[in-house]
Amino acid sequence: MKTIYKDILASISKKEKGLAVLIDPDKMVFEKVPSFIEKVNASVTTHIFVGGSTVDENTTETLVEEIKKYTKCPVVLFPGDVTQITGKADAILFLSLISGRNPEYLIGKHIASISKLEETNLDVISTGYILIESGKETAVERVTGTEPLSRANIQYIVDTAKAGELLGMKLIYLEAGSGAKLAVSKEIISKVKEALNIPLIVGGGIKNKKQIESAYNAGVDLVVIGTAFEEDESFFDDLRSPLSVGHFPKGEK
Ligand code: 1GP
């Protein structure tokens, strides 16, 4: 069994921060994997997340195998669907969309995934996934048929995150949605962090170093970025030198 979650906790206890690059199997051109991963390796990236809202069956497994040839970074599945589960990765965010009221995304897909998951050695990380309003409709909203939480009602977001923790979830992920117009605000992050005793992940609409640092300063433990790297790989050049905070060490192969 891999120890990705334990490693995250150990890094947090040393006040280190994580940066995950999200690769969508639907958007990544297979031939570009070696050069893309070379940039990931030269940057402060600590994790590679793989997943998307709609992905063809088997594409994820082939992509994960290819990525693993070139990096020591742990590969964590961030699945939009049961078909994206593969034992070739190191861990999986076992996401329950606790901001929504669609039973399929709260528990249904989880039950459907068990036979597949039990064939793997993935580190299964129970994650409270909270979608937050971000200025326009996002794929998560469309695919799951759920409403995001209002940005203005911070106490409700805090209570949702805390309920996730008290239900035994090991991580909370505040999601503005891929390509979000507005990233999750500093105010929301700091209030949620204050209430939690488990690690906090934030993603959606984060496009530059300043936004990453601002999220860290507000209390995020791990930032997730996808679109900004898809649109411009030179963003990795800004992330070669250490940011204002230390980063988790990369994993061992
Ligand atoms: C989406 O949080 C991730 O699920 C990343 O979002 O693509 O906007 O970076 P971006």
Image (cartoon, rainbow, N blue to C red):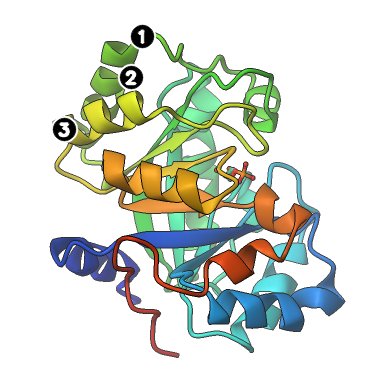
77 lies left or right of 63:
left
Q: CA distance from mark 2 to mark 1?
A: 7 Å
Residue, disc 3: 194
Sequence-first disc among 1 and 3 = 1
Three-letter residue code for mark 3: Glu
Report the front residue among 100 and 205: 205
Q: Is residue 64 above or below residue 154?
A: below
Residue at 71% x, 75% y: name it: 36
> Are the residues at dot 2 and dot 1 in contact (C-beta closer than 8 Å)?
yes
Q: Which mark is residue 25?
A: none
* Circle 1 crowding by C-alpha within 10 Å: few under 14, some 14–19, many from 20: few
Residue, disc 1: 153
Q: Is residue 121 above or below residue 195?
A: below
Residue, disc 2: 157
The percent position of residue 42, horizontal first and vertical second, equals 55, 81
Disc 2 element: helix
- Of the four image quadrants, the one with ligand 1 is top right
235 lies left or right of 43:
right
Q: Quadrant of residue 242?
A: bottom left
> Are the residues at dot 1 and dot 3 in contact (C-beta closer than 8 Å)?
no
Q: Quadrant of residue 5?
A: bottom left
Q: CA distance from mark 1 to mark 3?
A: 16 Å
Three-letter residue code for mark 1: Asn
The percent position of residue 233, horizontal first and vertical second, equals 72, 64
